[in-house]
Image (tube, rainbow, N blue to C red):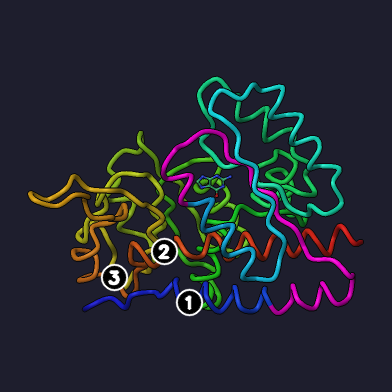
Amino acid sequence: MTAEAIDGKAFAAKLRERVGEQATRFESETGRKAGLAVVLVGEDPASQVYVRSKNKATLAANMESFEHRLPADTSEADLLALVDGLNTDPAVDGILVQLPLPDHLDEQAVIAAISPDKDVDGFHVTNAGRLAVGQSGFVPCTPLGCMMLLTERLGDLSGLEAVVIGRSNIVGKPMAQLLLDANATVTIAHSRTKDLPAVVKRADIVVAAVGRAEMVKGEWLKDGATVIDVGINRLPPEPGAEKGRLVGDVDYADAQRVAAAITPVPGGVGPMTIAVLLRNTLFAAYRNEG
Ligand code: GUN
């Protein structure tokens, strides 16, 4: 078997286009554009790349983008004051504080300061709680994007065995919750799981979100599994190359021999995150118009 590549890039492009059309309708209905504020503290190169592409995608979807770049030594009080101002700014529908923050800043305190109604990342405890008890709220972008790819490919997930590898608040836990809401039978595996290959073997759906390059091997997988690879890891450069290759948490070539479908890295889950962020922002804008 050669697994089909799940084209997240194409799916995300369609979603962005749809959100852009709805954003244009929002503007003609309300006389203002939906607005997303992105806050970046410091100079982390990967974060700078993400923030730049969020800004571009927001403008392309006919929304307003408010970028706030603060120096790495910004105090927590100053950052909280900025977030507070954004919470009450009627032009701002969604607020995203790019993570990770510099070490001297308390991420949980900063996330807690964001109004839950503008928390388009879905990281605030209020939104995590809403997801846990089945109330509507903001759902973290990456797991929601993974769910869209899964349901498009598999339709009804009822009764399927799903194994999520990784238990982060940003991906693993909300992913498990969404799969459970879709009536899958869900296992969350992590660094202390005993015999991970045996756990993965029973999965119809594998979501890998551990941040370890090419950890999941083809022989771990059940024949015909659907594999969603959330990892983005850079390998050490080959001799003569400036940069190493980007790979996921799954050994792609190896997994392709066994799985029915798999998301490539890059071009799988990655592009979905920004598309869902725009969708969440538009959702926030409609709610704020209330
Ligand atoms: N850093 C890496 N991914 C994300 C994300 O989805 N949201 C935020 N705020 N920071 C991130």
* Position of residue 54 measured from the top left corner of the image (x, y, whole percent): 56, 57
* Position of residue 21 measured from the top left corner of the image (x, y, whole percent): 70, 79
**Residue depicted at x 30% and y 44%:** 212
Q: Earlier in the sequence, mark 2 or mark 3?
A: 2
Q: Which residue is mark 3?
A: 259
Q: Nearer the viewer, residue 228 or 246?
A: 246
Name the amino acid, label 2: Ile
Residue furthest to the left in view is 239
Which element is circle 2 on?
A: strand
Name the amino acid, label 3: Ala
Q: Earlier in the sequence, mark 3 or mark 1?
A: 1
Which numbered circle lies on residue 145?
A: none
**Residue depicted at x 44% and y 62%:** 269
| Crowd tier of the residue under label 1, counting other residues whose Cα lies within 10 Å: few below 14, some 14–19, many 20 or above | few
Q: Is residue 13 left or right of residue 61?
A: left
The answer to the question of whether label 1 and label 2 lie on touching residues, with beta carbons closer than 8 A, is yes
Q: Which residue is mark 2?
A: 205
| Crowd tier of the residue under label 2, counting other residues whose Cα lies within 10 Å: few below 14, some 14–19, many 20 or above | many
> Is 23 a magenta residue?
yes
Q: Earlier in the sequence, mark 1 or mark 2?
A: 1
Q: CA distance from mark 1 to mark 2?
A: 10 Å
Range of magenta residues? 21-49
> Is 186 a magenta residue?
no
Q: Nearer the viewer, residue 73 or 76?
A: 73
Q: Which residue is mark 1?
A: 154
Q: Nearer the viewer, residue 140 or 267?
A: 267
Name the amino acid, label 1: Leu
In the image, the residue with mark 1 has its CB under 8 Å from the nearest atom of ligand 1: no
